[in-house]
């Protein structure tokens, strides 16, 4: 308006001046009303976002809000650390979590186990990602079935459960080779695992370049369930290679972005934290420690390894039980003691992740192993990973530990905890007879063969898991059989001899067994042969080390083989095709022969089961049927190998795992219902030593950890 006034002449009449003033007043009011409408349009949405004061309960009015949230109420989903607290969407958050590993539970049971974890009161699940499961062969990737990580994470989100992800590349976890794929051990020159060795880092970069882009869309800030991602695992207990840790952080940031919360976990001592943490605020340092230790001095130590205000107290592995090796008593911990130790953390607003909430099963050949004072002090883990966790191996929750922990968690949960589901019903399907379908040596011509002047490792031969049969010949002697020795064998080797000229009609004779933990020379029998004598050495990979300085754990015969001090040469390595958890041969002569054997047995039902015979020390395959009628509901069960020796069981070509009741303590193997089907289910047993004299196995409705030489096989920790 001022612009227009400046263009009027001074000779304007008073009437014109009055008209101009009236017009000016009208425009001014119009302009004020226009501004008011604009202001109203701006502020109305803001007020619309605010709930009416009457909707606030007294409790809600007292809730703390993160400072950034007060400034910006329309923020995106966010999980962050400040003021020595975890903050979820602007409110303080206490992590009450538990480890539950997707790779130890069949996918059909993921939801069942996650819901049981929620009924325990958990708001977060922590899981490792085993590289060897997802890349069992170099360049061969698997993200399907039990390896479908993305499906597991999305299911967790659907059920309202947050996730702390531990992608390694090393995971420990009582899992074969700590999660590293065994083909790494066949690379020449050998990469130095868990180090800044360029060869190793390049392999990790490739793997994480595949894995982490799958995780990135599932981060909490992107709308997913993953609130934190761990770097390595307890590295302070292994090494002090900071360049390695910084490289992992750099790769993680590249794929996950700068806002993702990265964390490390180390034992609660100054030494392990000095070596395993990354100073500053780029990576959050969590701790673990023995259950029963006073947690708060350890949490105070934790603060020294985090930036100021960035150290919410977190025990990322609160041990609810412990692992068990073959030959040990089954480890158990007191329920009340465990719950009381957890209460000490939660009652002062500390956070904890139960290790384990649910253990599950080491299906196939994936169990790990530990050592004692040296590499030969070898201790392989059981097939069961029950861990004495509150949610048992088969999912049972009707136990003292679940109830005790739930009571403690309930006292510190803001909301109500879901009702406790009933245990899944188990079924004792009864006894079945099996028949011998052939010895290992009957099938030797069906196996792939690798030839070498000297014995080579299983990894170098391409046999990543299970068994490999080494064969050579030596000249017969007139003055006795001689002494054979294998200075280094991983892990257990059964030795047989047979005259080479018998054209497959002879039977190998059992000589003895080399064991990694008790390796003594064997005296060969005086075998009278017209020509050479064949020497057979069946080596079992019983599980690679997953922890400690000897983790580079190749399998097979790892040294020359000596006969009376002379090196034996010209070896054939036969690869025995028993499928692993997620790697099953398309054409398997063992399964084909087993099917044939059971059909033959079925056609002669009136005949009594064939006894094992005099060659009971010769490894052999046995097969039988477990029949489930169309009317029956398929239920979980356990296969009892009582009276058997040592070996592997498959059902419907699914590798249930290892059995060794002679050593104990595990007598029965868990068989989840999804493995079974209506009609005939084919059970195949690879028995290494002495089968049940009656060739009988039983399907029962309970686990059993009382096998072995000891009278009481429960170890109360």
Image (spheres, rainbow, N blue to C red):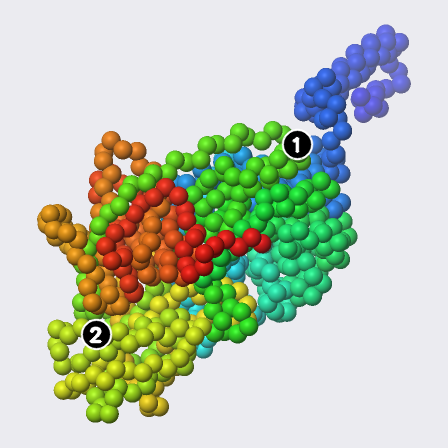
Q: Which residue is drawn at 79% across and 14% down?
A: 29
Query: From the image, which quarter does the N terminus lie in?
Result: top right
Q: Distance between the residues labelled 2 and 1?
A: 68 Å
Residue 645 in percent (x, y) is at 32, 61
Label 1 neighbour load within 10 Å: few <14, some 14-19, many 20+: few
Q: Which of marks 2 and 1 is in front?
A: 2
Label 2 neighbour load within 10 Å: few <14, some 14-19, many 20+: many
Is 217 above or below relative to 709? above
Residue denoted by label 2: 508
Q: Nearer the viewer, residue 281 or 489?
A: 489
Q: Residue at x 23, y 75 (%)?
A: 509
Label 2 secondary element: loop
Q: Residue at x 76, y 49 (%)?
A: 309
**Which quadrant holds residue 74?**
top right
Of pointers 2 and 1, the one earlier in the residue sequence? 1
Residue denoted by label 1: 414
Residue 241 in sight here: yes
Q: Residue at x 54, y 34 (%)?
A: 119
**Which quadrant holds residue 2?**
top right
């Amino acid at each position: 308006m001022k612009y227009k006034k400046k263009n009027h002449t001074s000779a304007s009449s008073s009437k014109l001046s009055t008209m101009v003033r009236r017009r000016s007043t009208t425009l001014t009011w119009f302009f004020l009303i226009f501004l008011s409408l604009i202001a109203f349009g701006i502020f109305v949405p803001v007020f619309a976002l605010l709930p009416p004061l009457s909707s606030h309960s007294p409790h809600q009015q007292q809730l703390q809000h993160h400072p950034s949230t007060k400034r910006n109420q329309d923020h995106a989903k966010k999980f962050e650390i400040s003021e020595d607290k975890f903050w979820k969407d602007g409110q303080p958050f206490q992590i009450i979590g538990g480890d539950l590993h997707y790779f130890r539970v069949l996918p059909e049971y993921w939801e069942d186990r996650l819901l049981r974890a929620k009924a325990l009161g958990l708001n977060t699940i922590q899981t490792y990602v085993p590289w060897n499961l997802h890349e069992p062969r170099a360049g061969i990737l698997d993200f399907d079935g039990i390896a479908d990580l993305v499906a597991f994470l999305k299911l967790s989100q659907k059920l309202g459960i947050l996730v702390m992800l531990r992608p390694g590349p090393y995971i420990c976890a009582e899992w074969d080779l700590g999660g590293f794929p065994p083909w790494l051990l066949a690379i020449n020159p050998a990469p130095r695992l868990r180090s800044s060795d360029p060869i190793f880092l390049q392999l990790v970069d490739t793997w994480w370049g595949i894995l982490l882009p799958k995780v990135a869309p599932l981060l909490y800030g992107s709308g997913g369930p993953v609130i934190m991602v761990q770097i390595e695992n307890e590295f302070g207990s292994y090494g002090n290679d900071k360049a390695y840790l910084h490289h992992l952080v750099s790769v993680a940031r590249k794929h996950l972005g700068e806002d993702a919360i990265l964390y490390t976990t180390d034992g609660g001592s100054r030494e392990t934290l000095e070596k395993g943490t990354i100073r500053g605020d780029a990576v959050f340092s969590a701790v673990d420690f023995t259950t029963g230790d006073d947690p708060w001095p350890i949490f105070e130590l934790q603060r020294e390894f985090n930036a100021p205000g960035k150290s919410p107290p977190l025990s990322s592995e609160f041990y609810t039980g412990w692992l068990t090796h073959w030959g040990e008593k089954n480890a158990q911990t007191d329920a009340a003691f465990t719950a009381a130790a957890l209460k000490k953390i939660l009652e002062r607003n500390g956070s904890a992740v139960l290790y384990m909430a649910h253990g599950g099963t080491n299906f196939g050949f994936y169990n790990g192993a530990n050592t004692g004072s040296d590499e030969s002090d070898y201790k392989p883990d059981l097939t069961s990973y029950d861990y004495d966790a509150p949610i048992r191996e088969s999912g049972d929750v009707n136990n003292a530990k679940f109830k005790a922990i739930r009571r403690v968690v309930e006292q510190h949960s803001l909301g109500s905890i879901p009702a406790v589901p009933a245990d899944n019903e188990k079924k004792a399907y009864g006894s079945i007879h099996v028949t011998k379908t052939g010895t290992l040596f009957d099938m030797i011509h069906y196996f792939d063969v690798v030839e070498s002047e000297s014995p080579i490792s299983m990894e170098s031969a391409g046999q990543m898991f299970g068994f490999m049969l080494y064969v050579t010949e030596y000249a017969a002697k007139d003055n006795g059989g001689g002494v054979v020795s294998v200075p280094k064998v991983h892990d257990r080797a059964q030795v047989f001899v047979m005259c080479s000229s018998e054209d497959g009609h002879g039977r190998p004779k059992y000589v003895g067994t080399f064991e990694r933990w008790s390796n003594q020379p064997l005296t060969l029998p005086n075998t009278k042969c017209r020509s050479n004598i064949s020497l057979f050495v069946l080596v079992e990979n019983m599980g690679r080390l997953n922890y400690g300085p000897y983790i580079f754990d190749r399998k097979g015969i790892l040294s020359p083989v000596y006969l009376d001090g002379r090196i034996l040469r010209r070896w054939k390595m036969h690869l025995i095709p028993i499928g692993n958890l997620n790697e099953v041969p398309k054409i398997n002569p063992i399964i084909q022969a087993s099917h044939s054997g059971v059909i033959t047995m079925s056609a002669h039902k009136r005949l009594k089961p064939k006894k094992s015979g005099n060659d009971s020390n010769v490894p052999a395959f046995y097969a039988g049927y477990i029949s489930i009628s169309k009317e029956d509901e398929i239920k979980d069960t356990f296969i009892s190998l009582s009276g058997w020796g040592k070996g592997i069981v498959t059902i419907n070509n699914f590798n249930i795992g290892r059995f060794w009741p002679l050593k104990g303590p595990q007598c029965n193997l868990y068989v989840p219902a999804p493995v079974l089907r209506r009609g005939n289910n084919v059970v195949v047993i690879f028995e290494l030593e002495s089968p049940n004299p009656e060739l009988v196995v039983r399907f029962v409705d309970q686990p059993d950890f009382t096998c072995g030489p000891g009278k009481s096989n429960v170890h109360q920790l």
